[in-house]
Image: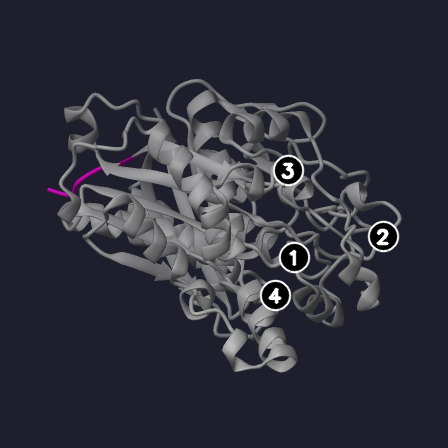
């Protein structure tokens, strides 16, 4: 018999909230996390984009000095979100679980980019003796998974997913497989990203992927708008505690939602551009629904990938139209990157947190900056006020797509 996976804990640190309650409240209120960058390196490098969506609560205000010194910013953000999720799930410091059946499934798009590039600068300017001994553990993409495994005592595997902007959602697929197979009873999954650094900003700008609304950062992320001109770079981490239903029930845990199904596909089309008709995306969406044993008509809400790029938003619409048909008009769509910016590998995790809460509470976050909707993207987008989802069994879909043609979709059923 296939085991059921449920979500029992949530954690997040984002540009619009340093914890889940604040993040959720601001997502419903339509708060923007985008703001001008005040670091000296913006002018020193003559960057064409001078704003981003930085953490609303810096990790320096949460972690100890020794933790800040020994962890890359991406690992720091993962630690903050993981501790909140662990406590939210009802686990204390001496959690009564079988650690041999507790796993980590964690993602990132880039990993410790700050450590890598700072280390290179140190080597060039001050020589090899001044390079930190902890450089490699801090820069490696699996650093967050390893650090969380050490802190929380996960011995059923510390899995790392690196699939660009699909990483966070794909980590849920790994978690679901671990629960269903019986390999683990509890999985801490999610993703992190700390890439607000001059090199990624310059590189994404060179690709013409980022908005250049330097004079109005809060209006820069405009999913589905006719004037969208690129994404806003964000940073942060999201963590979800996934358990077998039996394990959660045995300890009397509060359940937010069921992780009903996941789907992972690849476009095999282009290294950065999505397949124009959304064929890979639609296959992932259908696979997730099939995995959940649900029909498209069961879905009432989609938290879309919706990066606000001119070419990226349309393929996802085509995919949703293909999957949902006429039912699409009844599906409330939220494009929350309009508020948080695009957290790259961490986007799927923080947006999955919002998706779980939407399924649990029956409320959909708003999309901001949609002044004139693209007539070629005929979606029922939640704007102005939070969406009210129907009573009963609420099924919510989360879409994530990444460079390399990665597609990952998760389906949650509210409890």
Find residue 196 and name its label.
Answer: 1
Neighbor class of circle 1 (other Cα within 10 Å; few <14, some 14-19, many 20+) is some
Q: Which circle, 2 or 3, is nearer the viewer?
A: 3
Q: CA distance from mark 1 to mark 3?
A: 14 Å
Q: CA distance from mark 4 to mark 3?
A: 35 Å
Of the two numbered discs 1 and 3 on the same chain, state the one appearing first in sequence.
3
- Quadrant for the N terminus in the image: top left
Q: CA distance from mark 2 to mark 1?
A: 15 Å
Q: Position of residue 308 (x, y in %)?
A: 70, 52
Judging by the rendered image, the residue that carries numbered circle 4 is: 276
Q: Which circle, 2 or 4, is nearer the viewer?
A: 2
Neighbor class of circle 2 (other Cα within 10 Å; few <14, some 14-19, many 20+) is some
Judging by the rendered image, the residue that carries numbered circle 2 is: 214
Q: Secondary structure at mark 4?
A: loop
Q: CA distance from mark 1 to mark 4?
A: 29 Å
Judging by the rendered image, the residue that carries numbered circle 3 is: 56
């Amino acid at each position: 018999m296939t085991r059921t996976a449920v979500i029992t804990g949530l954690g997040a640190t984002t540009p619009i909230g340093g914890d889940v309650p604040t993040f959720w409240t601001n997502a419903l209120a339509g708060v923007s996390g985008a703001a001008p960058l005040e670091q000296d390196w913006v002018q020193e490098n003559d960057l064409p984009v001078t704003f981003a969506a930085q953490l609303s609560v810096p990790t320096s205000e949460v972690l100890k000095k020794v933790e800040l010194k020994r962890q890359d910013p991406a690992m720091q953000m993962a630690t903050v979100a993981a501790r909140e999720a662990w406590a939210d799930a009802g686990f204390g410091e001496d959690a009564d679980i079988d650690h041999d059946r507790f796993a980590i499934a964690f993602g990132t798009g880039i990993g410790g980019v700050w450590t890598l590039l700072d280390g290179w600068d140190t080597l060039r300017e001050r020589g090899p003796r001044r390079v930190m001994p902890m450089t490699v553990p801090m820069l490696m993409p699996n650093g967050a998974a390893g650090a969380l495994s050490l802190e929380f005592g996960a011995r059923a595997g510390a899995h790392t997913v690196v699939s660009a902007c699909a990483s966070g959602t794909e980590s849920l697929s790994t978690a679901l497989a671990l629960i269903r197979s019986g390999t683990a009873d509890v999985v801490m999954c999610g993703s992190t990203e700390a890439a607000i650094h001059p090199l990624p900003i310059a590189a994404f700008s060179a690709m013409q992927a980022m908005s250049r609304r330097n004079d109005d950062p809060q209006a820069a992320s405009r999913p589905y708008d006719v004037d969208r001109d690129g994404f806003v770079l964000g940073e942060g981490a999201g963590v979800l505690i996934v358990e077998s239903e039996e394990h959660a029930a045995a300890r009397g845990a509060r359940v937010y939602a069921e992780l009903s199904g996941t789907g992972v596909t690849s476009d095999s089309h282009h290294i950065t551009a999505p397949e124009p008709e959304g064929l890979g995306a639609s296959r992932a969406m259908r696979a997730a629904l099939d995995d959940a044993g649900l029909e498209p008509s069961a879905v009432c809400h989609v938290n879309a990938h919706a990066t606000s790029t001119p070419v990226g938003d349309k393929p996802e619409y085509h995919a949703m139209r293909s999957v949902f048909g006429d039912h699409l008009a009844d599906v409330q769509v939220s494009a929350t990157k309009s508020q948080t910016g695009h957290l790259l590998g961490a986007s799927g995790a923080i947006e999955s947190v919002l998706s779980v809460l939407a399924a649990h509470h029956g409320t959909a976050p708003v999309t901001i900056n949609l002044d004139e909707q693209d007539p070629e993207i005929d979606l029922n987008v939640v704007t102005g006020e939070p969406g009210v989802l129907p009573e009963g069994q609420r099924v919510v879909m989360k879409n994530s797509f990444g460079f390399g043609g990665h597609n990952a979709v998760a389906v949650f059923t509210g409890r």
